[in-house]
């Protein structure tokens, strides 16, 4: 095809216009020179690095090392900067360059995280692809002010009779779980998560410095019981850098705060904060912070208080959601008066103590009623529990004292023997297998049957079997009453008598005691 002079003229005009626009754009553009601070690595240790040359760097700022490795500023000294590594420190050599990013450590938050397993800075670990979210939040955030908080009034049902009846937990509360190794601390947290399947509660499980095999078993159990649909798992395994172990619980809290601000109820399990404190101690000693009691730095109380103070129940104008914290810590030789346990007991709103003695006797979960307390949950407990379990805690503690004294005597009067028999049955009814949460109405029916004497004639070895009959019968014949209990209704005297009658009929009880005293 031949081009005409007219076409060539139009093409030249178009090119001239384009060049004129480019010239105008280039003439109006001014290159801005920005200084960039570059530091040099002076020393590399396990999980830390000391850097010189970053004179204007800020505390908790994110910095980058060669190979896209990340670290967070921890110490800001006149001559050098102490950095905790968020990636493997073995890949860094002295003399390497360090660049500032100008931002603090933040993580992705949003619905896309539900059902996923991520590390302490939000990177996926489950081989399910990248996590696409719109929002990001800083890992370290201020706790909500007092005026933004509402009282804790809604119960968080664990599905465990010994806890829901005697040491209740409310949404927005901080309830500490403590005990020696291998006493079932994680089991209680897992049961609580499994019990939220129909409660519209988002659960976050944060594993800190645990073995990867243990974390894998926990995730498998959550999948088996269909709990991963509403659960986010954050893992900082024992082989990970201590910096990730330190950051992990703050990451879990920021993710929970996002949902709380949307008006959702969130449960966060920190498993466990003893190892978190040890990771912080390791980092502090490597960075030459002065050691204090038991070589922990002086601000060990502050790092846990600023974490747990973020758990609360917000007022409606500020979102109306709640963040419930279940921190787990490990005691040694049943010593709950040691440094870290006493710190956390003073920060939280109560504690659930698991006794090794009860565990060895096969009383599971091994909740020590005498040493456990809930400073908030009683106000948030379902009203029906108050009618049934109001005096159960005191009576059960008295039974335990009576049982310990009865071992020294050979002769017991009839009244004392009857109280012991009733107490043994209460203890037996409080036993519960793992991953078998029980609805509130069935719990109340079981407890009511045992404390009113319906089960006095049942041999202790058959309590569990007879209890199942009671629960089945109550669910079958009193469906309306069960629904009313679950929705927060109170028990009337007629309801009380009806449950006792149905329970007695279920196990063929001949006589029902009129009082609930031991």
Image (tube, rainbow, N blue to C red):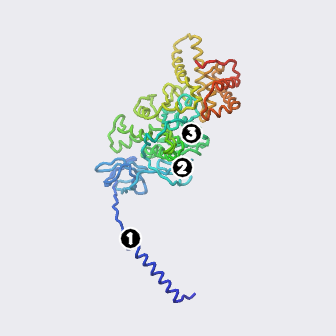
> Residue 187, position in %: x, y?
55, 35
Which tag, 3 or 1, sits closer to the chain's start? 1
| Residue 235 in sight in this render | no
- The residues tagged by marks 1 and 2 sit, at their Cα atoms, a distance apart of 42 Å
Q: Which mark is residue 219?
A: none
> Residue 101, position in %: x, y?
39, 56
Decide: is 172 above or below 82.
Answer: above
Q: Which mark is residue 113?
A: 2
| Residue 470 in sight in this render | yes
Decide: is 186 above or below 84.
Answer: above
Helix, strand or loop for disc 3:
helix
Which residue, given by chain and number where applicable, does mark 3 sit on? 193
> Residue 192, position in %: x, y?
56, 37
Which residue, given by chain and number where applicable, does mark 1 sit on? 29
Q: State if disc 2 and disc 1 touch (CB < 8 Å).
A: no
Q: Nearer the viewer, residue 147 or 444?
A: 147
Of the 4 image quadrants, the one containing the C terminus is top right
């Amino acid at each position: 095809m031949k081009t005409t002079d007219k076409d060539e003229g139009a093409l030249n005009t178009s090119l001239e216009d384009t060049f004129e626009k480019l010239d105008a754009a280039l003439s109006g553009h001014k290159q801005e020179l920005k200084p960039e601070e570059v530091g040099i690595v002076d020393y590399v240790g396990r999980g830390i690095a000391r850097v010189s040359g970053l004179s204007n760097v800020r505390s908790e700022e994110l910095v980058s090392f060669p190979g896209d490795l990340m670290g967070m500023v921890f110490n800001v000294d006149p001559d050098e900067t102490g950095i905790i590594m968020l990636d493997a420190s073995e890949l860094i050599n002295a003399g390497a360059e360090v660049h500032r990013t100008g931002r603090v450590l933040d993580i992705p938050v949003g619905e896309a995280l539900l059902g996923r397993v991520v590390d302490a800075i939000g990177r996926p670990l489950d081989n399910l692809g990248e996590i696409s979210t719109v929002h990001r939040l800083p890992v370290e955030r201020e706790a909500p002010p007092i005026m933004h908080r509402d009282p804790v009034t809604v119960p968080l049902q664990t599905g465990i009779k010994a806890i829901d009846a005697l040491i209740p937990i409310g949404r927005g509360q901080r309830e500490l779980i403590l005990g020696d190794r291998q006493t079932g601390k994680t089991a209680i947290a897992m049961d609580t998560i499994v019990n939220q399947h129909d409660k519209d509660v988002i659960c976050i499980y944060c594993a800190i410095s645990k073995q990867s095999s243990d974390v894998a078993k926990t995730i498998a159990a959550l999948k088996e019981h269909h709990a991963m649909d509403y659960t986010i798992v954050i893992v900082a395994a024992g082989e990970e850098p201590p910096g990730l172990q330190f950051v992990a619980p703050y990451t879990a809290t920021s993710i929970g705060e996002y949902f709380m601000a949307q008006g959702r109820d969130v449960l966060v399990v920190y498993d466990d904060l003893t190892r978190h404190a040890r990771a912080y101690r390791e980092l502090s000693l490597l960075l030459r912070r002065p050691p204090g009691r038991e070589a922990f730095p002086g601000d060990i109380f502050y790092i846990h208080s600023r974490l747990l103070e973020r758990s609360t129940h917000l007022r409606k104008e500020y979102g109306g959601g709640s963040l419930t914290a279940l921190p787990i810590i490990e005691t040694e030789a049943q010593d709950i008066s040691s440094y870290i346990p006493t710190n956390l007991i003073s920060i939280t709103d109560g504690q659930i103590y698991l006794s090794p003695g009860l565990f060895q006797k096969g009383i599971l979960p091994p909740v020590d009623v005498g040493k456990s307390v809930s400073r908030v949950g009683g106000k948030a407990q379902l009203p029906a529990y108050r009618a049934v379990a109001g005096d159960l805690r005191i009576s059960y503690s008295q039974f335990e004292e009576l049982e310990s004294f009865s071992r020294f005597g050979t002769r017991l009067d009839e009244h004392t023997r009857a109280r012991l028999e009733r107490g043994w049955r209460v203890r037996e009814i409080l036993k519960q297998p793992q991953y078998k949460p029980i609805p509130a109405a069935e719990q109340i029916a079981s407890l009511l049957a045992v404390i009113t004497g319906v089960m006095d004639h049942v041999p202790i070895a058959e309590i569990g079997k007879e209890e199942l009959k009671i629960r089945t019968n109550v669910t079958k014949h009193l469906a309306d009453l069960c629904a009313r209990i679950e929705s927060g209704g109170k028990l009337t005297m007629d309801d009380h008598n009806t449950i006792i009658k149905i329970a007695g009929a279920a196990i063929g009880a001949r006589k029902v005691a009129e009082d609930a005293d031991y």
